[in-house]
Structure formats: structure tokens, C-alpha cells
Image (cartoon, grey):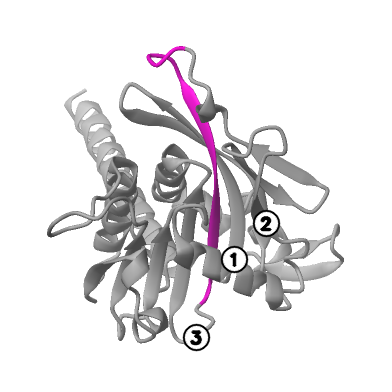
């Protein structure tokens, strides 16, 4: 009997040990995978500074004012960069004070073209460049019925508006829409530009929040890991009759819908994803 109990205890110890080791390995694998995904999505060159370009709001005596939503968006991106072990310099610039030298650096530009002239500059350059898989392009336009209410269009196929213009219940959920674009800097091929442009400030915050919370999903693609396992590291895009990388480390554009409530961003959703590269 004693020998049987000893064998049972030994088996239990081995089983528990395997579970613990498996749990630790899973955690380490997940952390390593997430960090690798961050490095692939936010593949800024650490040889150059990273500039956060925020909209001009109102001239102050010493410092220009930054919107609360923009500061939250910056915090989300900095959190990702710290998680991946970013060692480069991080700086900030008012959109109205960018030099030509600044424009060659890694840039995260915050806010739509209505408030941020650098975002407008990037979107206009994208319209003029030949991005094979990014046609028609996204653009911010005024609403015909109300010029104060802007919307995001993509040709005749997509129209995205913001529900945050008319807030009936300030304590309830408020929805806004945003555009995320990551592309090679048009002025310096070794650096990147990340556009986080909401129709309103809540959308800009939602775009950064979506990146932070869904970096693995963006990297792996909608079909999940099993598709890459079954069909190899590349997948076939039947709609556009072309092959694209299964792992998303190139340039892309995405429309995000964010939900704001009680000083928090409890939910974000990807409405459209385009592989530019």
C-alpha cells in the first residue's frame, strides 16, 4: 500500500510540475510573441528620434495646449514602445513647428487633417503616390448636411461618421471613428510614419488604444494562427487575386470605431483593414 501511495504521489508531483512548467512557458511564449509583434508593427528605426506630432490647439505663453485625448493616445503608444524595449529618443512637436529635418524622423501624428496640418500633408501625399492596394484612398471630408461634422470616406464603398457630434446623454457611451495608417516615411525610407486620426479627439485616443490592446491580432491577421499553420507563412487574398504576408509587418491602413464611457475606452472595433504593402 505504501509503495502504491508513493507512486501516486510521485505521479501527482510530476503532473503538477509539468502543469507549472507548461504555464510558465506559455506565459513566456506569449510575452515574447507579443513583444515581437510590437517590434514588427511599430518597426520604427531606433537610429532616428521618434516624434509625436500633436495638433495646435491654442497658443500659450510658454507651452501650447495638448488635448487630453492626445495625451492618452501618446501614453498608449509609449506603453507599447516600452514593452518592446525601445531605446531611441522620444520627443514631441507642435504640428505648426515641424522643420524639414523633423519630417525625416519616425513620426506618430495625432488627430485628423482638420486640426493637424501634418496629418493632412501625409494623407495628400498618399493620394498622389501609387499604392497598388490602397485605391481608393481614405480621406476626411465635410458632411454635406453639416460642415462642422466631418466624416471619413473611401471612394464610393465606405462612409464612416462619428456619433460624438451629438451627445444626448453625457454619461452614456459615446462613439467615434478613426483612421490608423502605418507607412514608410515619404521623405526617409528608413523611418516610419504612424497616423492616428480620429474624426474627433475620442477617435484618436481609440486608435492608439486599439493598437495597444490588439497588437497580436493585427500581426496575425483575422484568420488566426491556424491559417498560417495550415497554408504556410503566406496566404492568398482571393478578393484581390494576390499573395500577401501572413505576418503583418508592412504598411497598412485601418478604420477603428471606439466607444468612450466613464473616462475610459472600454471597447474598440476594426471596421476595415487594408494591407498597403
Q: Which residue lies under the disc numbered 1?
A: 123
Labels in figure, total: 3
Q: Is residue 231 left or right of residue 183?
A: right
Q: Residues within 10 Å of mark 1 (few under 14, many from 20)?
A: some
User: With respect to residue 96, does 102 lie above or below?
Assistant: below
What SS does tag 3 mark? loop
Q: Position of residue 112 (x, y in %)?
A: 50, 53
Mark number, residue 138? 2
Q: Majority secondary structure of the magenta segment?
A: strand
Tell which circle, 2 or 1, labels the residue nearer the N-terminal end. Answer: 1
Disc 3 to disc 1, how far (Cα)?
14 Å
Q: Which residues are magenta?
A: 169-184
**Of the pair 45 and 6, the residue shown nearer to us:** 45
The quadrant holding residue 170 is top left
Q: Quadrant of the C terminus?
A: bottom right
**Of the pair 11 and 133, the residue shown nearer to us:** 133
Amino acid at each position: 500500500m505504501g509503495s502504491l501511495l508513493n507512486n501516486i504521489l510521485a505521479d501527482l508531483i510530476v503532473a503538477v510540475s509539468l502543469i507549472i512548467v507548461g504555464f510558465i512557458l506559455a506565459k513566456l511564449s506569449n510575452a515574447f510573441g507579443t513583444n515581437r509583434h510590437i517590434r514588427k508593427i511599430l518597426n520604427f528605426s531606433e537610429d532616428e528620434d521618434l516624434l509625436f506630432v500633436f495638433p495646435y490647439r491654442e497658443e500659450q505663453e510658454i507651452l501650447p495646449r495638448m488635448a487630453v485625448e492626445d495625451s492618452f493616445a501618446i501614453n498608449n503608444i509609449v506603453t507599447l514602445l516600452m514593452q518592446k524595449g525601445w531605446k531611441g529618443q522620444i520627443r514631441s512637436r507642435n504640428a505648426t513647428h515641424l522643420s524639414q529635418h523633423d519630417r525625416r524622423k519616425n513620426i506618430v501624428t495625432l488627430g485628423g487633417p482638420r486640426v493637424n496640418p501634418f496629418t493632412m500633408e501625409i494623407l495628400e501625399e498618399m493620394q498622389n503616390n501609387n499604392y497598388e492596394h490602397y485605391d481608393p484612398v481614405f480621406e476626411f471630408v465635410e458632411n454635406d448636411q453639416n460642415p462642422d461634422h466631418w466624416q471619413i470616406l473611401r471612394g464610393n464603398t465606405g462612409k464612416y461618421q462619428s456619433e460624438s457630434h451629438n451627445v444626448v446623454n453625457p454619461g452614456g457611451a459615446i462613439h467615434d471613428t478613426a483612421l490608423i495608417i502605418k507607412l514608410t516615411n515619404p521623405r526617409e525610407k528608413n523611418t516610419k510614419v504612424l497616423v492616428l486620426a480620429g474624426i474627433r479627439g475620442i477617435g484618436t485616443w481609440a486608435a492608439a488604444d486599439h493598437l495597444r490592446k490588439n497588437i497580436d491580432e493585427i500581426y496575425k491577421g483575422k484568420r488566426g494562427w491556424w491559417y498560417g499553420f495550415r497554408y504556410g507563412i503566406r496566404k492568398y487574398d482571393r478578393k484581390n487575386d494576390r499573395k500577401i504576408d501572413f505576418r503583418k509587418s508592412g504598411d497598412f491602413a485601418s478604420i477603428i470605431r471606439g466607444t468612450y464611457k466613464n473616462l475610459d475606452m472600454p471597447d474598440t472595433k476594426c471596421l476595415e483593414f487594408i494591407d498597403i504593402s
